[in-house]
Structures are given as C-alpha cells and as structure tokens.
Amino acid sequence: MTNPDAGALATAADVKSGAASALEITQAALERSESRNREINAYTSLTRARALAEAAAIDARRARGDTLPPLAGVPYAVKNLYDIQGEVTLAGSIINKTNPPAAQDALLVARMRAAGAILIGATNMDEYAYGFTTENTHYGATRNPHDRRRTAGGSSGGSAAVVAAGCVPLSLGSDTNGSIRVPASFCGLFGLKPTFGRLPRSGSFLFSASLDHPGPFARSAADLAACYDVLQGPDPNDFACSNRAAEATLPHLSQGIAGLRIAMAGGYFEQIAHPEALAARDLVARALGADKTVIVPEAARARSSAYLITAAEAAAQHFANLKTRAADFEPLNRDRLLAGALIPALWILQAQRFRAWYRSRMLELFRDIDILLAPATPFAAPLLGTETGIVNGKSVPLRPNIGLLTQPISFIGLPVVAVPVWNAQLPIGVQVIAAPWKEGLALRVAAWLEKEGACRSPVAKDMN
Amino acid sequence: MNTENPAIAALVDAQALAIGLPLDAAHRPGVVQNLERLAEMAQAVMDFPLPHEVEPAAVFSHDKS
C-alpha cells in the first residue's frame, strides 16, 4: 500500500508497478478527505461513486496489460467552478444551485481523467472566485490545515487546503488576481499560474474573462510539472486559449539554473511586503545566487488597473442576477460587484490602454532577465475574520489587499510558480516569475529550490 | 465615520437608474464606498500620460473563427 502522504508521481509509479491498486489508493483518499474535511471545511462535495468507478477502470486496464497513463490512480480535487459531469457547478454561490447539472466535464477535468487521475471531490472557494480568503458565507470558511484558526487563502482555498491536509496530492484551482498564488502561499504549497491563454477554460465558470487562468497545486515541483503537462493543449472553444502545442516540462525539470539571469523585484514589491515576506524572498534569492534588484515599472498602477478591469468584467458577467437578486450574492462581494456595474467606460478603456503599455515595458525588462522573484503575499496567513491589515504603513481593509503583490504580475498574464518557504511557524510563498510561455523555466527553478532545501511542502501535522 | 463623496454618490444613483440596476437602500452605502475605492484606482490610471498610439489590450482575435 502506498504511503498516503506520497506525491502524485510516486502514487502513479506504485499503481503502474502493482505495489498498490488504484482502488485502495482511492478508498484511502476518500476516507482521509471525509475525516479531514471536518476540520478544514475544504470540500463542498465528494464524488465517491465516480472516484471508485475511475479507479476500477484503471485497475482493469492494468490487469489487461495496457500501458497506463501518466497520472494513473492519482487522486485529485477541483475548485467547484470546474464542471463535473452530473454535478451542479456552484462556483461558491447559492445562485447557481438551481442550475442544471453539468452535461460534461470541463476540458481540464476531462484531461485529468484521460491522464488516469481519480476525481475525489469539488472544493470550496470565495463566491464566483472574488476574494482571497475563502470565507464563504454560504458554505462556511475553509480553514488552513497548518493552523485552523487561519485562512487557507483564496479564492482557490479549498483546493489548496485539501492538498496541504494530505487528502489528495494534486488539485486544480484558478487564478485571476492571485487566487492560486495566495492560497499556495498561505498553505505552503507549490502552485502554478501559467501564461494567460496557456490552459483552456472550457467548462469552467468565468470570473473575469481577460484575467482568468486555470492551474494546479501540488506538494512538489515534479508533481506540479507532471500535472501541468497533462493539462496543456489548445482548445477550439476557448477564445483566449493559445493554439500553441503542449510543451512538456517534466523531462527538463532537473536541468538546474546554470545560465539563468535571476533578479528580485524591488520598489513597490519591497514597500508592500512585510518583513516575513521579504525574508522568504531573500532566502530564495540567496539559494539561487541572485543579488540584483530590478524595478517593475508602474506596478501600483498595474494593480489599480487590474482591480478596475476585474470589477467591471465580473459585474458584466453577473449583471442579470445583480439586477434581480442582489441579496443572494456573497455579502462580502455584493457591493463591490454592484459598484463594478457602475464604472464609467473611460476608466476601463484607459486601464486597458495602460495594460498594453505596461505589457511592452515588462517584456523589455525580461530581455535582460529570465526570472523575477517577488513575495506572493505581503504576510503569512491571517486569522479568519480579520477585517483590516497594514499596507505601506496604513491600516486598510485586509481582504481586497491580500493580492497586492500578485495582481501586477497576472495583469499581463506572466507565468508564475509560487514556491513555499518555511522560515517561521507559518509558511509563506515566493513568486518565481518568467516571461510569457516560459513556465518550464519557473518550474526548473522551483525544482532546484526544493532540491537545495530552500522550499518544501509538508503535509500538515495533527490531522485526523 | 464615512463621509460620502457627493460626485461618486451622484454617479451611483444616476448610473444605476440609467442602466436599470435597482439598488436596495441597505446596499447603497457599500456600493458608494466601493465605487469611491474604484475611483481612487481610476485616478491613478487616468493621471498616467500614455502615448497616443497605445491601443487597449482587450483580448480579441479571429484566429478561431
């Protein structure tokens, strides 16, 4: 029997060798998910019957002597904005509860299934992905497995928590302004937000169409790369998805960092980050031998523009319901969504023009460097219910400001691996940022940091 | 204590009326507060001089048609 804390690749190897059956691995994952969920409230549903059927199918293929796919028998979970055939896609809302069940899987769920992975359940999130704390008023807050008084981050908080709690080795989330990188930081995980347009969104519930990026969580760089590799490929039905062919990253993961030009993001990123976040970035920079600092041009305006565009796009997406049933929205988001519907067009178009300018300046910056390092969050996981925090010396509403360091990067869709650093009681993440389409470089750096002992992602202790 | 910015409060009321968005009295103060925050962000964007030739970055393509 496989160690239940084993990663995805180790689990798949055991299934392929016959050291463990997919069925026994799946049963163990379902049991753990059920018992540990009582402490962390990370799942909104378990897909037990489907999981057992998928596992039996993998075992039958092995019995026939078939070559098994790369993630054969690996349990995983998905944020509940991904369509799961036969289930209602809640996206954290009660409004969606009366929608019909999904007729088919989201394309990424179908790709995980084709790769042999076993779907264990759907996970909790901030309603419609608008938030950084997974304090969902309808379904309850997800708790951080490493300290259950604290937030797991959001909006993909449930997907992060189930991996950190050791329920499953892999999960899928989505990141619009930081919703993979923030929970990866707070839960001590490796998380990948690929280049905008790299992974398809067909069958996932949109939040802010020009900013939404799907991506995976894992407890090792190799598992993250393995999952990302099976997710890649064009999608004729997603307008934003690139026609680029898949570019496998796992085979190149151990190539090291020789020749890579790595720099730290100074200025805005250093002003916003608290000492624990800067210490984590410095630890990562030292491990990589990076001592140069570069200034990201107009990062604060980039964040403001991302905030504006998100509010407007989200409001347009939800306008029909905002008109007729505003009171059914998450109270923490409702007024921001309503305000998003009232934004003058001038502000949005100017933000979109600024976006084009900022993109060209950032691409210039990446002519001289390969990797940019910045903290993923200004601080480690706050206590649940925290209303205000300190940013740049000022007391501000906490929840909308957790993404200050992630938003200027996703605004122009750069690929990022969030890597976990433990230099205090709580983990905190560092963003390893690359130029567009260079996910492979960021994953190589993450693998190097793990090998050097600078980053690690243990399963939370004291879970039942 | 919250003091409403009168220009933003007027924008909320006029725009909501014009686009047919009913605003519950209980929601209105939060909406005004959020639009004030968005207006601050917009000011930073509007203050930035952009060269005339810069186009909006909206995603649009005929690649898949």
Image (cartoon, rainbow, N blue to C red):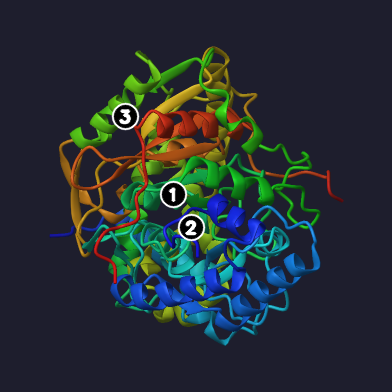
The residue that appears at 40% across and 72% down in the rendered structure is: A32
Q: Residues within 10 Å of mark 3 (few under 14, many from 20)?
A: many
Quarter of the view holding residue A12: bottom right
Element type where label 2 sits in the image: loop
Q: CA distance from mark 3 to mark 1?
A: 19 Å
Label of residue A219 in the image = 1
Quarter of the view holding residue A16: bottom right
Left or right of A3? Residue A26 is: right
Q: From where the camera sits, is residue A202 visible?
A: yes
Label of residue A169 in the image = 2
Q: Looking at the image, is A5 positioned above or below residue A257? A: below
Quadrant holding the C terminus of chain A: bottom left
- Nearest the eye: B6 or B34: B34
Left or right of A116? Residue A459 is: left
Q: Position of residue A64 (x, y in %)?
A: 80, 68
Tell me which label, 2 or 1, sits earlier in the chain. Answer: 2
- Specify the farthest residue to the left: B1
Chain label for disc 3 = A
Element type where label 3 sits in the image: helix
Q: CA distance from mark 2 to mark 1?
A: 7 Å
Q: Residues within 10 Å of mark 2 (few under 14, many from 20)?
A: many
Element type where label 1 sits in the image: loop
